[in-house]
Amino acid sequence: MKKIRRTALVVGAGPGGSTAAYYLAKNGVDVLFVDKETWPRDKICGGVYVPALYPMLKEMGAFDEMMKYQACSITEFRLIDRDEDYVDMKTEPAMIATRRFTDDQIRRAAIRQGADFMENYEATSLIIRKGVVKGVHGLYHNQDMDIEADITVIANGSHSELTRQLGLFPDDPDLTMYCFRAYLDGVEGLAPHMAEEYYVPKGLTGWSPICTTWLNPHYGGKQAVLGLTITEKALRDTGCSAMEFYEYWRDNTRFGHERLKNATLIDKFRGWRLPGSRKLGNGVVPGAIAIGDSIGAAECAFEYGIPSAMTGGMIAANVIAQCAAKDDFSFEATSVYQKLAEDALNPSLGFNALFRDELLNKEDVMKDFFKYVKAQKDYPNIMFGDTAAKYMMEVLHLDLGGNKSNQ
Ligand SMILES: Cc1cc2nc3c(=O)[nH]c(=O)nc-3n(C[C@H](O)[C@H](O)[C@H](O)COP(=O)(O)OP(=O)(O)OC[C@H]3O[C@@H](n4cnc5c(N)ncnc54)[C@H](O)[C@@H]3O)c2cc1C
């Protein structure tokens, strides 16, 4: 069996893994990052890269290339409640693009920076000796191959068998979202810069705060990415399948009918499981740091997970670079990651959790929020994040405690 040994190994070349590989290489650390797919690869996603990521993407030299694949920039956001009342608000302009192309630019940035990359390598399990992760067992073109490393960054996404092996994988059915995505043509009435988020209509028995359908416009709004998000708990409670939720929405709601009456699917409806979180879970064990979807670091109200994955990747790489400089990869030295990552990520994870628990989850509060939004002097020229924060503090008297929207 073939064996390789490196200082740092990153498993997964999504936004989290590629960012970690980029910053490891930039800091002069010997790094190999691997992915089971042949690249470029698709990822089921709405494809929104929030502007908070732009400085990092620019530093990596990936931003300009990614902009070439931008399908639109969203600057507005419509929330539609279960009675089909709605409010419109502004957001910071955010790039929407097809992940197949844009993730590849982040991966290429890491390679340009000096990281070695191996595709078609599937990590199958962790090598653990005396309680310390020493790398991975895996398959390279179906041949056994072990990769050993002083430190392993686990960034292999929301189906990670590696974080399951460590007991770090989150499995809360109320936070685990089943998300479906399809590209559509012939969509009607969708404004070219406005994303729409529809909460599941009342006609369905049982619901969850994030049972939503959403449409993100592509290329002028005639095309769109359609998403459907349902918690695992809601699927169990209602006994509906995801497709039944979607068909109900399309056939029984005003917006569903208006938007989709002449629409055709460009590709298949494809599903993905996404665990979200209210705050960052533990990602550090002796010999490894787990980031991004592999520990369920996505936000729990709007499903954004690229920011957590990339920010986690950058922080992990910087901590590992300090460990490498001292040749100290002890658990104590790598654990520095956890607090730094919590400080960086918990404000927006916490904001999403409050928005979901205190607002989306309470139908009367959501209605009151809509009234509040429409009564604002400059409506609809108001920012979503600021307005939601103001409402939660002024009307719901919540202590946001540093939590902040990234929209
Ligand atoms: C329907 C849907 C819509 C979403 N919309 C948005 C959005 O608009 N904006 C946003 O910010 N977030 C969104 N998200 C969340 C976002 O997609 C994820 O949070 C993000 O991709 C996490 O990045 P990651 O690098 O952790 O994992 P991933 O992007 O999943 O990358 C993991 C990589 O690991 C590789 N891999 C997996 N297993 C192995 C293995 N065993 N060995 C080697 N390689 C492996 C995979 O091939 C993959 O390339 C959405 C999610 C869904 C499901």
Image (cartoon, rainbow, N blue to C red):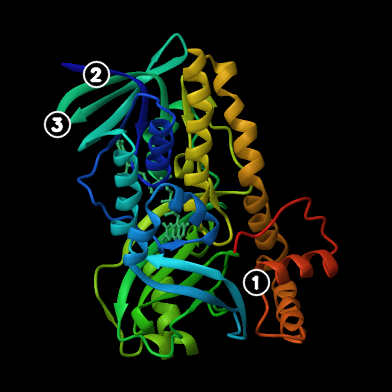
- The residue that appears at 38% across and 89% down in the rendered structure is 188
Residue type (three-letter) at the residue carrying disc 2 = Ile
Rendered view: 206 above or below 54: below
- Expressed as whole percent of the image width and height from the top left, the position of residue 306 reads 47, 52
Regarding residue 274, the answer to whether it shows in the image is no
Residue type (three-letter) at the residue carrying disc 3 = Asn
Query: Residue beneath label 3, please?
Result: 142
Residue type (three-letter) at the residue carrying disc 1 = Phe
Rendered view: 188 above or below 391: below
Q: Is residue 177 left or right of residue 97?
A: right
Nearest to the observer: residue 366 or residue 132: 132
Q: Label 2 near label 1: C-beta < 8 Å? A: no
Query: Residue beneath label 1, please?
Result: 384
The crowd level at tag 1 (other Cα within 10 Å; few <14, some 14-19, many 20+) is many
- In primary-sequence order, the first of circles 3 and 1 is 3
Nearest to the observer: residue 245 or residue 318: 318
Quadrant of res 3: top left
Q: In what element is the residue under mark 3?
A: loop
Q: In what element is the residue under mark 2?
A: strand
Query: Residue beneath label 2, please?
Result: 4
What is the spatial separation of the Cα atoms under label 3 and label 2, in whole angstroms? 16 Å
Which numbered disc, 3 or 2, marks the residue closer to the eye?
2
